[in-house]
Image (spheres, helix red, strand yellow):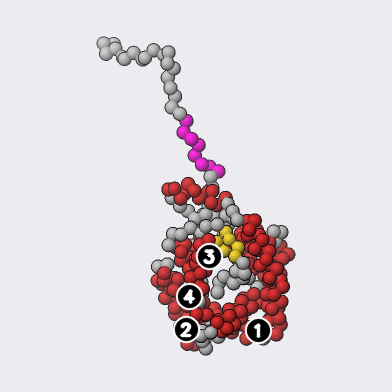
Amino acid sequence: MNRLPMLTSLLLAAALLGGCATVAPTATGAAAAAAPAQAATPDPWENWNRKVFAFNEGLDAAVLKPLAETYRDVVPSLVRTGIGNVFGNLGDVWSAANHLLQGKVQTGLEMGMRVLTNTVFGLGGVLDPASEMQLERRSEDFGQTLGTWGLASGPYLVLPLIGPSTVRDTAGFVVDRRASYTRLVDTDAAAYAMSGLELISVRTSLLGVTALIDQVALDRYGFVRDGYLSRRRNAQFDGAPPLEAFDDFAAEPAAAPAVAPANRPPAKPPNPAK
């Protein structure tokens, strides 16, 4: 579940870890002409987004953060790690599917091997022997798949209870939820319990990060937004986004050709006899 309410903190962590600057994807033709305007206004709904962001932050301070701190203090570290590994292994199944949907056959098969290894030899995913075997986790979601298929990200959007997103990522989130492992359980109560436990598990792992963000971010909303957009762009291009194009050295308009004065007599042709 990549789109948990505390995604706010996840994306702040990405910003701290040096995500690339937010720039619009390279384009050609009409799309290229429109790109500068889109890049200059990634957040046209900022007024609405800030209100939703404040609501989510209040919910986190009142509910999620206290629960995460209690979970950290009560549950042993070894147990917390095992729970996190199980949820990560379940998420890897959908990541493998998205790799294949994007045409990344090799990494899709590697992610499938990772799931198989951790399921069989890791006690259902409680342990993570795949990482020791150099089978790296490469998480992908349907929002990234839509981007690979050519769908633009659209404006930045903060969703109630869910957190930072874009128009494209919101559409992808709907599909991600339909493909979630919670669909495998028999009752809604079990699905809510699993989702809640994963939420607390992830929020607990980010307690240190959010504490640091509180110290360094002058505008928490802007910091979260820039971190999210940077992280998503970096993920879209598998860690190697194209460089941003600058217009500082754009070619100047060509000078108009000189026009001969109207009163100048026409030049005489050369005399062949001379």
Disc on the earlier residue, 1 or 4: 1
Quarter of the picture containing the C terminus is: top left
Counting from the top left corner in percent of width and height, residue 250 is at 51, 41
234 or 176: which is nearer to us? 176
Mark 4 or 2: in front is: 4
Residue at the disc numbered 3: 170
Considering every residue shown, the one lying at the far left of the view is 273
Q: Residues within 10 Å of mark 1 (few under 14, many from 20)?
A: few
Residue 135 appearing in the image: no
Q: SS class of the residue under badge 4? A: loop
Disc on the earlier residue, 4 or 2: 2
Residue at the disc numbered 1: 77
Say the numbered circle drawn on residue 117: 2
Spatial CA distance of label 1 from label 4 is: 30 Å
Tell me which residue sits at (57%, 59%) in the image: 156
Which contiguous range is marked in magenta?
248-255
Tell me which residue sits at (58%, 61%) in the image: 157
245 or 222: which is nearer to us? 222
